Image: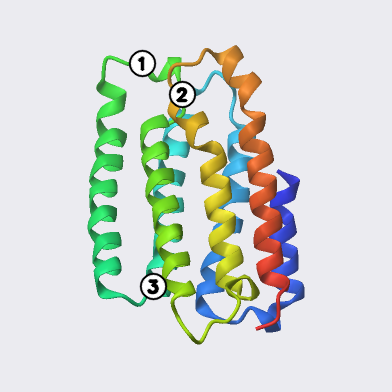
Amino acid sequence: MLSGLLPIVLFLVFLRRNKEAKLWVIFLYTILSLITDILFDALPQENKVSSFYLFSFFTITEFTIFSSFIFLQIKKKALRLFIAFSSIIFYAFAINNLLTRPASSIPISENSFDSVPASVESILVILYCILLYFEQMRRPEISFIYSTKVFWVATAFLLYLAATLFLFISTASLTEKEQEAYWPINLLSNILKNILLSIAFILPK
């Protein structure tokens, strides 16, 4: 949780380097992520219903920020249309899960994590990041993509979601003890993501 403070502090310290609107969006995400972690930590462990809704709303918000950031960086119309169309499908799926899961045959008390929407989010954003890399490498005005802030932000998304994808997929079938054993994968991935976002905020324009 404390690693979430790192990109927030460094964004403010190097504010002059991070005045672009797209970076303010990522800054907003780091704040929302930290607040979500604090709220989840403050909730009683037996309060599975509140945890489920907290996770669900954060998954939708996180996907919105990630996909919007990448959408604004991509120039090709066909790729932008693909992102827009697949995002609509994700929203329909995630909102349906949010509305129907409480009434489904799977009680929230068994698993408060929205495993399937989080998995779909991971797959889509990983694909978006690959498309972004592919397009940027083909743009002649960018000699070294790793020298840009966009590269480090996209890499933070990619590594975090790639590392946690199979964890999110399998979470629904794990017992609480098994979740506790494997959840450090998510925690370490989150720390790595915050470090990479911090690098993006430190880099000069």
Residue beneath disc 3: 74
Q: Position of residue 26 (x, y in %)?
A: 55, 65
Image height check: is 199 above or below 97? below
Q: Earlier in the sequence, mark 1 or mark 2?
A: 1
Please state which of the two labelled residues, at mark 1 or mark 3, is closer to the viewer: 3
Q: Position of residue 18 (x, y in %)?
A: 63, 78
Q: How many marks?
A: 3
Image height check: is 49 above or below 196? above
Residue beneath disc 2: 170
Work out how far the residue at label 3 is from the one at label 2, CA to CA, in angstroms.
32 Å
Image height check: is 98 above or below 151? above
Q: Position of residue 33 (x, y in %)?
A: 58, 50
Q: Is residue 145 left or right of residue 136?
A: right
Disc number placed over residue 18 in the picture, else none: none
Three-letter amino acid code of the residue under disc 3: Ile
* SS of the residue under disc 1: loop
Residue under the image location 57 percent in, 44 percent down: 36
Q: Earlier in the sequence, mark 1 or mark 3?
A: 3
Q: Earlier in the sequence, mark 3 or mark 2?
A: 3
Three-letter amino acid code of the residue under disc 2: Ser
* SS of the residue under disc 3: loop
Q: Is residue 15 left or right of residue 156?
A: right
Quadrant the N terminus occupies: top right
**Quarter holding residue 38:** top right
Q: Residues within 10 Å of mark 2 (few under 14, many from 20)?
A: few
Disc number placed over residue 107 in the picture, else none: 1
Q: Residues within 10 Å of mark 1 (few under 14, many from 20)?
A: few
Work out how far the residue at label 1 is from the one at label 2, CA to CA, in angstroms.
17 Å
Q: Is residue 75 left or right of residue 93?
A: right
Q: Is residue 205 visible?
A: yes
Identify which residue, 68 or 70, lies in the foreground: 70
Q: Residues within 10 Å of mark 3 (few under 14, many from 20)?
A: many
